Image (spheres, rainbow, N blue to C red):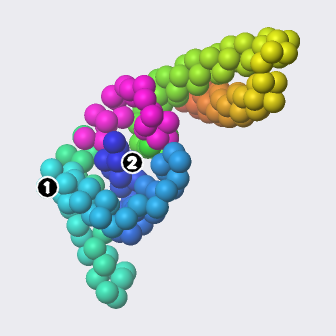
Amino acid sequence: MYELLLLGMLMSRDMSGYKLRDVLGSALVPQRKISNGVIYPLLSKLEANGDIVFIEDAKDPRNKKLAHITAAGKDHFYQLMKQPVADGARSESVYRFKFRGLFAVELSQRKRILQDYANKVQEDLNIYRGVHEHLLSLLADHSLNIEALKAGIRSIDLSVAISQTKLDWVTQYLFEILNEERHHNNEAKN
């Protein structure tokens, strides 16, 4: 899973292990600090697979090593981007990793990834709204703990708001891609 993000980041430029560690930690959902004991074995694995090589940073007086993606690494990245995202606890992080690498894939693949995400978020939103309606209907039953129900409703309200924000974000992104696609098609015609 982490390979996708690391290779995606290296598609944009060479980076140090330290920088990749920070990028990985900030991309995880929820965000967390990544230790050297996690990042360097990952980088060693990518190097052993031929996905990256380490090169010296000519601009750095300490000759710091930078990870550089190879042709095999690029192929591996494209394969990972094409794989569907499995449902589960890590799916949000995987989608976020893919979002970071969208710049490096074709428009059609960008649209597919974003549409898959939109479908997943819409599915979650529908479930949250259903639960919300159910909890609201239970408020009329005074034999139940009303305060507990209200706390549950507030919690579901947060999930609805987060899902709606995600859906708004992905809808806007898809709209921008469609405009970009129209622009490219118009240029091709002229």
Furthest toward the bottom, the residue is 61
Which of pointers 1 and 2 lies earlier in the amino acid sequence?
A: 2
Please say if 143 is above or below 33: above
- Does the magenta run of residues contain 89? yes
Say left or right for 10 vs 112: left
Please say if 52 is above or below 143: below
Q: Which residue is mark 2?
A: 5
Task: Say whether marks 1 and 2 touch (CB < 8 Å).
Answer: no
Placement of the N terminus among the 4 image quadrants: top left
| Amino acid bearing label 1 | Ala
x, y percentage for residue 20? 39, 61
Secondary structure beneath disc 2? helix
x, y percentage for residue 109? 43, 28
| Residue shown at 14% from the left, 55% from the top | 48
Please say if 142 is above or below 155: above
Please say if 4 is above or below 181: below
Q: Kindly indicate the quadrant of the structure image that contains residue 189.
A: top right
Say left or right for 143 vs 182: right
State whether residue 66 appears in this view: yes
x, y percentage for residue 4? 35, 44
- Cα–Cα span, label 1 and label 2: 17 Å
- How many other residues sit within 10 Å of disc 2, few (<14), some (14-19) or many (≥20)? many
The magenta segment:
76-96
x, y percentage for residue 9? 40, 53
Along the viewing direction, whichever of 126 and 135 lies nearer the viewer? 135
| Residue shown at 72% from the left, 13% from the top | 134
State whether residue 168 appears in this view: no
Secondary structure beneath disc 1? helix
| Residue shown at 81% from the left, 30% from the top | 147
Along the viewing direction, whichever of 126 and 7 lies nearer the viewer? 126
Q: Which residue is mark 1?
A: 48
